[in-house]
Image (cartoon, grey):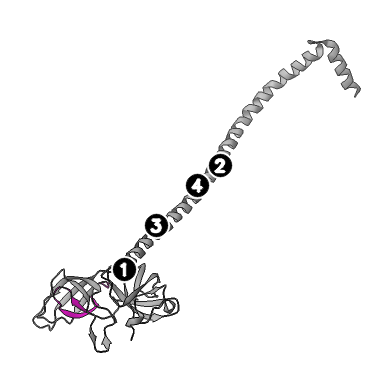
């Protein structure tokens, strides 16, 4: 304590360039090389720290941008799906309200919500059931053409067996020539149909449109109304030993990408 007081007193008495100042300058000069050396040694570590800090910051920013990009991509996909679904539903409703919609029927639009398990299952499940007026054996269509038949119904869903199923059969006619037959699944590609049981003397041409026959005999009638488009004739063959023509039909409906359908429900005044 006395030493510190003495140094302060000497410092005041020495003035600006006293002995104590010279001692301080000498000490500072002696320590300067060590200070410079310490700064040179510390500089690379400081630069490395700044580089690492910048790297971590950049990675964090990149991760944030990647997550934001994923969210935006998902939102864009949902918007695109919704836009397509909206366009398909508009097309279905336009078909229902159009002049080619079969009389005596109402149309219940329904989304396709699943396919039963099994690689060879030719059926879909739709989001409409008995609560919506859907019944077993109701025809199912898209704006392009016939899809199949309702074969099972619950309160809110229904199972639709497609035309491409082995058990499906639809009485049909050539819209241009009235040649009659039965549309069944083809033996080659699963999406191929055949117009079977067409007599050899009847005329069927490549490019002709095949539609449902929609017959009625007394109290009995076809499950399908007349005139629903089924497909286009792509091949006509005939052998001398065969009783019937060999007619291949390409369906108008795309069974591989069904997203929404229209169930043809008989109106109350047409029900027996």
Q: Nearer the viewer, mark 1 or mark 2?
A: 1
Q: Which residues are magenta?
A: 172-191
Q: Which image quarter is the N terminus in?
A: top right
Depth check: 50 or 249 in front?
249
265 vs 21, left or right, is: left
Element class at badge 2: helix
State the residue in front, 67 or 205.
205
Q: Which residue is mark 3?
A: 80
Instruction: Please rate how many residues cluster around mark 1, counting C-alpha atoms within 10 Å: few if below 14, some from 14 to 19, many from 20.
Output: few
Which label's residue is closer to the chain start, 3 or 2? 2
Numbered label attached to residue 65: 4
Q: Secondary structure at mark 4?
A: helix
Label 4 vs label 1, nearer the camera: 1
Q: Determine which residue is flagged by label 2.
A: 57
Does residue 223 show up? yes
Q: Badge 1 is on which residue?
A: 97
Q: Does the magenta segment cover residue 250? A: no
Lower sequence index among marks 4 and 2: 2
Residue 216, percent across and down? 24, 85
In the current view of this chain or complex, which residue is farthest to the front? Answer: 269
Q: Residue 35 appears at what percent x and percent y?
A: 68, 24
Give me the residue at 20% from left, 73% from top. Answer: 210
Furthest residue toward right: 2
Q: Earlier in the sequence, mark 1 or mark 3?
A: 3
- In the displayed structure, does residue 203 sit left or right of residue 51? left
């Amino acid at each position: 304590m006395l030493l510190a007081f003495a140094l302060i007193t000497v410092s005041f008495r020495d003035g600006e360039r006293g002995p104590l100042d010279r001692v301080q300058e000498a000490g500072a000069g002696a320590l300067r090389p060590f200070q410079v050396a310490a700064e040179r040694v510390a500089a690379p570590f400081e630069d490395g720290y700044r580089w690492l800090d910048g790297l971590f910051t950049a990675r964090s920013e990149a991760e944030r941008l990647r997550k934001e990009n994923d969210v935006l991509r998902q939102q864009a996909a949902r918007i695109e799906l919704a836009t397509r679904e909206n366009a398909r539903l508009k097309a279905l409703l336009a078909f229902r309200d159009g002049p080619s919609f079969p009389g005596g029927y109402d149309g219940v639009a329904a989304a396709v919500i699943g396919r039963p398990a099994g690689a060879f299952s030719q059926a879909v499940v739709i989001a409409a059931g008995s609560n919506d007026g859907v019944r077993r054996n109701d025809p199912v269509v898209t704006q392009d053409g016939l899809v199949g038949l309702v074969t099972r119904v619950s309160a809110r869903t229904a199972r639709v067996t497609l035309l491409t199923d082995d058990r499906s059969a639809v009485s049909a006619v050539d819209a241009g020539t009235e040649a009659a037959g039965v549309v069944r699944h083809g033996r080659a590609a699963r999406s191929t149909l055949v117009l079977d049981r067409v007599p050899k003397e009847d005329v069927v041409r490549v490019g002709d449109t095949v539609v449902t026959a929609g017959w009625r005999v007394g109290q009995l009638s076809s499950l399908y109304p007349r005139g629903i488009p089924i497909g286009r004739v792509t091949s006509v063959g005939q052998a001398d030993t065969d009783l019937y023509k060999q007619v291949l039909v390409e369906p108008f409906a795309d069974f591989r990408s069904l997203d929404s359908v229209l169930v043809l429900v008989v109106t109350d005044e047409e029900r027996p």
